[in-house]
Image (tube, rainbow, N blue to C red):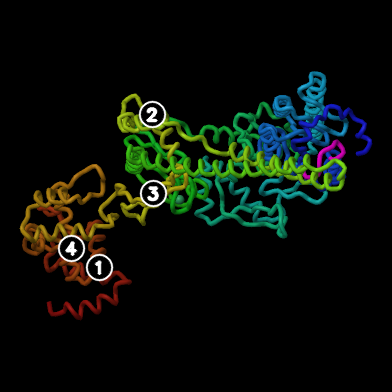
Amino acid sequence: MSTNLNMPISKILPRHLERWALVYLRQSTAQQLVRNQESTRLQYALRDRALALGWEANRIEVIDDDLGRSGISAEGRPGFQRLVAEVGLDHVGIIVGLEMSRFARSCRDWHQLLEICALFGTLIADLDGVYDPADHNDRLLLGLKGTISEAELYLVKRRLLDGRLAKAQRGELGKSIPIGYHRRPSGEVIKDPDEQARAIVETIFEQFEQLGTTTGVMRYLKEHGLRMPVRERSGPQMGELAWQRPVRMTLTAMLKNPMYSGAYVYGRRAVDPRLKTPGRPGTGIRLVPQEKWKVLLPGRFPAYITWEQYQRNQELMFANRPQHTGTARQGEAMLVGLIFCGRCGRRMRPAYGERRFQYLCVQAKSVWLDPLCQSLTGAVLDAEIERQVLEALKPAALEVSLAVAADLEAKRAKEERLWGQKLERAKYESERAQRHYYAVEPENRLVARTLEGNWEEKLQALRQMEEEYHRHRAQAPVGLTPGERERIQTLAEDIPGLWHAPQTTWAHRKEIVRQLIDRVTVAVVGESERVQVVTSWAGGHETRTEIVRPVRNLNQLSYLNAMLDRVQALREAGESSRTIAQKLNEEHWRPAKRRCTFTPEMVRQMLCRRGLTRKGKKRKPVLPDLGPDDWTLEALASELALPLSTIYTWVHRGWVQARKDSKRPSRWIIHAEASDLEQLRILRATRPQQRNAIRQASGKTGGA
Ligand SMILES: [Zn+2]
């Protein structure tokens, strides 16, 4: 580094040396980090460069948070962000880096850094020199370096992509091998050597040809207990077959993959930057329409289907895609994206019907065709969350929150006072050290040197404390002014009115809910009407409640027995069905469906369950009109000692003379005289499988 000592050091002034020297290290990927150790060593040597430029060892800080992080932009690079923040707090005299313009890989980040350095008088240094971004000529040079660096990056990428494309055009660019194929060590791609694996792939395409839908194929695989032959891609089992349960996404990917028709394709996927989530690799990838594929070479691989069949499959899948019917919806799900399943932890989503909407946990169903995890009517949950939100925004509740905020502010003020005292003390100590230094006789050099060192030390401590104080201040939340507080309170009084106002759209309500609530977790208790709800508020507080959802029938109600007991007690006290219905409504019992109230008819049905009629007595069976030699099915069955189902079969086959009773519940009546009975016995006897029964029965019925 000594060669750099003759650089124009004149740019470095005491005001720079007073502040920190930050050494910024970065190396794009972990791989580069391993391979390029020379560069890493060189980067750490930058510390020596800062020393050589005149900074003291304890005023140099190395920022290496970004080692091993790739960075096209500053997002996801905490080190670079810390650098910018420290410059903004006026703590930095110089930034030292290996190739300065590579600090920031996009021109936007680079110019932002230059701008802020110019503002706070921070210098920038690399192996070539020291630059002052506030100086016009230096700024020009630095800007140019940034542009060149970006162009370099672009060229490297371009060359890489061109190389890939050329290789792809020859059909030589390695592709990932889907289910049903295998790559030999020579690189040749063949059909999977496992016969069963090949058979499954063939079955999938055959079934799609026949059934025409992915769901159909899924169901077929599931019903026949067939599993997908997946070759492990890594780990000790690499290359081995693993039989996995069918997953819809894999199936769809197979049906869309042109490789099964033997074609080599390049450029089937592209990243759409608008859909990309920053910091999440692999997002934003979309399939490119066939006419835009860069390379399409038919007949490159052994095929499972023909190209024509592949095309047909694509058309079918396109036609099958879910379509939005555009029917008007009743209401709107307020908790989209916030609601999670308390049973499996997955996100739940709304499903809109004609009259109502539901929240469903469908992932297991859509991925594996498993049964639906759980569902509940959306309106009841939305209503409960609405109630909680309005409760939280009530003036009284807000008062508490504001009081907490005021407490925090008071604590903050106390901290501020402590800081003031600490700073005061440090200042006093450094001034005292200064006074001591000046008081000593100049001839007493040894003492003077010690005192100078002491003074220097105290000054350093003071500076460090001041910097820490700045950081502390920068992180402090801004307190509310009395005016703001008043405005919040006035608004709070209006909130319920505002919430219900016709001008307030569902989008607004959703927005408010999202400001207050992080997530809502719901779990239906068994199949019952009870739903446990956990509301997680922004800030970490949780509210646990239980709500009641409408269910399909009475049997699902957890309180069914208690309710029937009550109905029975009322009936036994001599109440009419109408009065019982009224009482149930007054006592806030709920029927299965939420919107309705109890009616006399519903009470009668409940009484039926307990076998009770009016006045608390067991219902007498209605006897059919029986003529001479008429039999009910039960009577005949017992007469002939046959199962009831056999007599039914005979009625339906016309082997007996039967009619329906004129009185409800319209039972079958069979007319059989003594001679008919004899014939029926013979009929029974002629059926070989009944012979044993005949002998037993004839012994019993012989005397009749
Ligand atoms: Zn679930």
Q: Would you place residue 122 above or below residue 191 in this image?
A: above
Q: Residues within 10 Å of mark 2 (few under 14, many from 20)?
A: few
Q: Is mark 2 within 8 Å of ligand 1?
A: no
Q: Which residues are magenta?
A: 51-58
Q: Nearer the viewer, mark 3 or mark 1?
A: 3
Circle nearer the N terminus (2, 3): 2
Query: Residue at point 82% right, 47% down?
Result: 450
Give the spatial CA distance, label 2 vs label 1.
82 Å
Q: Indicate the secondary structure of the residue bearing disc 3.
A: strand
Q: Are marks 3 and 4 in contact (CB under 8 Å)?
A: no
In three-dimensional space, the C-alpha distance between marks 4 and 1, rounded to whole angstroms, equals 10 Å
Give yes or no for contact between labels 2 and 1 (Cβ–Cβ under 8 Å): no
Q: Position of residue 383 (x, y in %)?
A: 32, 40
Q: Nearer the viewer, residue 550 or 184?
A: 550
Q: Which residue is mark 4?
A: 633
**Three-letter code for the amino acid on which mark 1 is drawn:** Pro
Residue 301 visible in this rendered orientation of the protein: no
Whole-number angstrom distance, CA of label 3 to CA of label 1: 59 Å
Q: Are marks 2 and 3 in contact (CB under 8 Å)?
A: no
- Reading the chain from its start, which is encountered first: label 4 or label 2? 2
Residue under circle 1?
A: 643
Q: Residues within 10 Å of mark 1 (few under 14, many from 20)?
A: few
Q: Earlier in the sequence, mark 3 or mark 1?
A: 3
